[in-house]
């Protein structure tokens, strides 16, 4: 039976990159298993959506080159991806310049606390990393 999953990642990937990679891998597994998945990147975890950052993450989590980007691509294909507008802005990323910084083809739902509350209240299962 398919479930509705909500993943929130707010861990700073500069502090605990492995935890962030595990969170994305779990969300990708839920997609692979046929579940409905919403994933929300908040705080400094929004860095995981930056092309250069995610490309450099593999070595920090002891994986082969391209591993983390492939996980993100799986999420892009099968999940709804949300991000904190305020967290992105704190790093200098806005909807206007996102195409220059973020992973190509990323269709984001820009939101904040109201989005987190709505998504988590609608989910069958919520996981926070």
Image: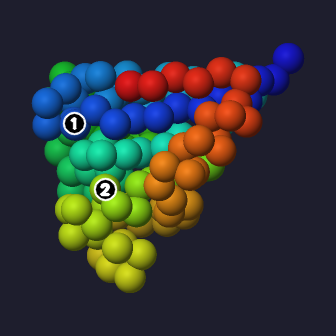
Residue 15 figure quarter: top left
- The residue at the point 41 percent across, 45 percent down is 41
- The residue at the point 64 percent across, 41 percent down is 119
Decide if residue 25 is on the left or right side of residue 46: right
Locate residue 128, reporting x and y percent.
45, 25
Look at mark 1 in the image and give the residue it sits on. 13
Q: Marks 1 and 2, Cα distance to the nearest angstrom?
A: 14 Å
Pointer 1 local density, CA inside 10 Å: few below 14, some 14–19, many at least 20: many
- Determine which of the numbered discs, if any, sits on residue 37 in the image: none
Decide if residue 20 is on the left or right side of residue 80: left
Which of pointers 1 and 2 lies earlier in the amino acid sequence? 1
| 19 in relation to 88, above or below | above
Residue 75 figure quarter: top right
Taking the view exactly as shown, the residue that stands out farthest to the top is 1
Query: From the image, which quarter does the N terminus lie in?
Result: top right
Locate residue 106, reporting x and y percent.
49, 61
Taking the view exactly as shown, the residue that stands out farthest to the bottom is 96
| Camera-nearest residue between 72 and 123 | 123
Single out the mark in the foreground, 1 or 2: 2
Look at mark 2 in the image and give the residue it sits on. 87
| 126 in relation to 98, above or below | above
One can see residue 14 in this view? yes
Decide if residue 109 is on the left or right side of residue 35: left
- The residue at the point 21 percent across, 56 percent down is 52
């Amino acid at each position: 039976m398919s479930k509705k999953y909500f993943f929130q990642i707010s861990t700073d990937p500069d502090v605990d990159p492995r935890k962030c990679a595990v969170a994305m891998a779990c969300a990708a597994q839920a997609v692979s298993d046929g579940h409905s998945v919403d994933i929300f990147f908040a705080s400094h975890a929004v860095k995981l959506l930056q092309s250069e950052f995610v490309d450099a993450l593999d070595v920090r989590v002891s994986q082969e080159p391209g591993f983390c980007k492939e996980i993100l691509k799986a999420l892009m294909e099968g999940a709804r991806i949300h991000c904190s507008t305020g967290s992105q802005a704190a790093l200098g990323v806005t909807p206007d310049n996102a195409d220059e910084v973020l992973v190509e083809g990323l269709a984001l739902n820009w939101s904040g606390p109201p989005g987190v509350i709505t998504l988590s209240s609608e989910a069958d299962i919520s996981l926070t990393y």
